[in-house]
Image (cartoon, rainbow, N blue to C red):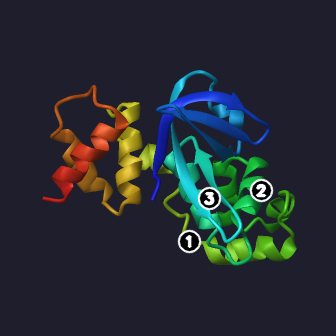
Amino acid sequence: MYYYLKGTIVEQGENYIVIDVGGIGYQVLVMHPQDFPLFELVLVYVAHIVREDEEYFVGFKDLQEKKVFNQLISVKGIGPRTALTALRGISIDEFIACIQNEDIKRLKKLEGIGPKAASQIILDLKGSLSDFGVISSKTTKKTMNKNQEEAMQGLKVLGFKVKEIEECFERINDDSLTTEEYIRTGLRMLRK
């Protein structure tokens, strides 16, 4: 399974980017192409969607965005393209707030989401997004750098508890590691 692509953004379209990874260009559907600056080396979290008649990548700027998307496509009647289109019209924090506050009215305004789908989204996701929106404040210490915070989110997605991840990071003396290096090192330490 693909987890992320790391490379240079060589093209931005209306709803996609093209990322050059080792000389191979991957077209990736995204919510907001402008979040991925042209001609810069970036790490794009991806979901690899495979259907009977098509295969494509959906890209995300962070793990929270990816997790919300994966939760949304688990809702009955919501496919990847519908989820992507809907999430283009709302911030991730606002979407989570809509679920938590059962704001059907706001969800109905999203492209591709009618009253029935809005109700189904709230029914299926209510409670499952309770730990969202607080990732940056509750689960990371102020002393953590950006790479540590991203690694924290990645390890959390893999099922590790916040406390054990924080304890693990406190034992890593090198603050200059990349996100991937923190994840790899963290996995080695947490699986012992």
Secondary structure of the residue carrying numbered label 1:
loop
Residue found at the far left of this picture: 192
- The amino acid type of the residue labelled 2 equals Ala
Residue 153 percent across, percent down from the top left: 41, 49
Q: Residue 127 shows which numbered tag?
A: 1
- The amino acid type of the residue labelled 1 equals Gly
Residue 42 percent across, percent down from the top left: 51, 31
Pointer 2: residues within 10 angstroms few (<14), some, or many (20+)?
Answer: many
Instruction: Examine the rendered structure and indicate whether residue 55 appears above or below residue 179.
Output: below
**Mark-to-mark CA distance, 2 and 1:** 20 Å
Pointer 3: residues within 10 angstroms few (<14), some, or many (20+)?
Answer: many
Residue found at the far top of this picture: 39
Which residue position is annotated with label 2?
86
Determine whether, in the image, residue 98 is placed left or right of residue 165. right
- Depth order, front residue of 6/185: 6
Name which residue lies at 86% across and 69% down.
Answer: 114
Which residue position is annotated with label 3?
69
Whether residue 177 is visible here, answered yes or no, is yes
Q: Earlier in the sequence, mark 3 or mark 2?
A: 3
Secondary structure of the residue carrying numbered label 2:
helix
Residue 24 percent across, percent down from the top left: 54, 36
Q: Earlier in the sequence, mark 3 or mark 1?
A: 3
Name which residue lies at 78% across and 54% down.
Answer: 85
Name which residue lies at 67% across and 71% down.
Answer: 52
- The amino acid type of the residue labelled 3 equals Phe
Q: Nearer the viewer, mark 3 or mark 1?
A: 3
Asked if the residue at tag 1 contacts the one at tag 2, i.e. Cβ–Cβ closer than 8 Å, the answer is no
Q: Nearer the viewer, mark 2 or mark 1?
A: 2
Q: Residue 17 shows which numbered tag?
A: none
Secondary structure of the residue carrying numbered label 3:
helix
Determine whether, in the image, residue 174 is placed left or right of residue 57. left
